[in-house]
Image (spheres, grey):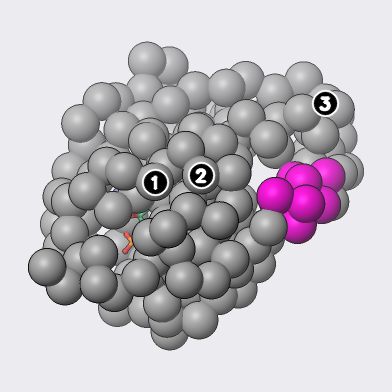
């Protein structure tokens, strides 16, 4: 385990199991359709890559870069689009793929935006849900694991742009950010 991690919350094996069951669930729900999977960069990358391997229906992969944390350990609530979709979602079924839903600000903003742009449906698939962090009411449609209100990193989740490459999700030692 990495020296800055105090506890592993979601292991590599568990992430694999989550990807398989969520992928099967999405494939079943969207059978006969061609959804657009919209990954929110950068946090979505590892989970998007893991999840799509278990989606066995035709699905498009697109990305948007959205930021609410601006580096720190708490969300600013101010959601910025840094890189927009290059395709129209008008009339399409969209599944937003995320690493975590925390305050709910990012997902509630982007869901509304894509519906406003004419998406036929918008659902959210997230590896982690931290309901105790909510400031904006938001319920994801597909949840890998519900976690307590701890600052977690790994498998896409960063602290000041680091730790995204850990193959598991773990709790960051407070000594790392209390400097
Ligand atoms: C993180 C995370 C989610 C969002 C969740 O992204 O990846 O996208 O915050 O937080 P919220 O529910 O409080 O809005 P961040 O803004 O740090 O950008 P990143 O994905 O590039 O790290
Ligand atoms: Mg993100
Ligand atoms: Mn982040």
Residue at (38%, 60%) from the top-left corner?
4
Contact between labelled residues 2 and 1, with CB atoms less than 8 Å apart: yes
**Relative vertical location of residue 67 with respect to residue 89 in this rendering, above or below:** below
Residue 32 visible in the current orientation: yes
Q: Secondary structure at mark 2?
A: loop
Q: In the rendered image, which quarter is residue 37 located in?
A: top right
Contact between labelled residues 2 and 3, with CB atoms less than 8 Å apart: no
Which is nearer the N-term, disc 1 or disc 3? 3
Residue 74 visible in the current orientation: no
Residue 57: mark: 3
Name the residue that disc number 1 marks: 163
Boundaries of the magenta span? 12-20
Q: In the rendered image, which quarter is residue 8 located in?
A: bottom right
- Camera-side mark, 3 or 2: 2
Q: CA distance from mark 3 to mark 2?
A: 29 Å
Give the total number of marks visible in the rendering: 3
């Amino acid at each position: 385990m990495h020296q800055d991690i105090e506890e592993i919350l979601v292991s590599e094996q568990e992430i694999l199991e989550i990807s398989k069951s969520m992928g099967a669930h999405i494939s079943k729900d969207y059978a006969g359709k061609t959804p657009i999977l919209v990954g929110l960069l950068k946090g979505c990358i590892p989970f998007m890559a893991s999840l799509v391997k278990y989606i066995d229906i035709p699905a498009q992969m697109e990305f948007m870069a959205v930021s609410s944390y601006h580096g720190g350990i708490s969300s600013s609530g101010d959601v910025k689009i840094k890189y927009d979709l290059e395709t129209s979602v008008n009339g399409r079924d969209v599944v937003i793929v995320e690493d975590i839903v925390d305050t709910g600000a990012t997902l509630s903003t982007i869901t509304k935006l894509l519906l406003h742009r004419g998406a036929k449906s918008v659902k959210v698939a997230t590896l982690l849900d931290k309901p105790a962090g909510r400031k904006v009411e938001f319920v994801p449609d597909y949840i890998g694991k519900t976690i307590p209100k701890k600052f977690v990193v790994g498998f896409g989740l960063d602290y000041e742009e680091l730790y995204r490459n850990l193959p598991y999700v773990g709790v960051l030692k407070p000594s790392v950010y209390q400097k």
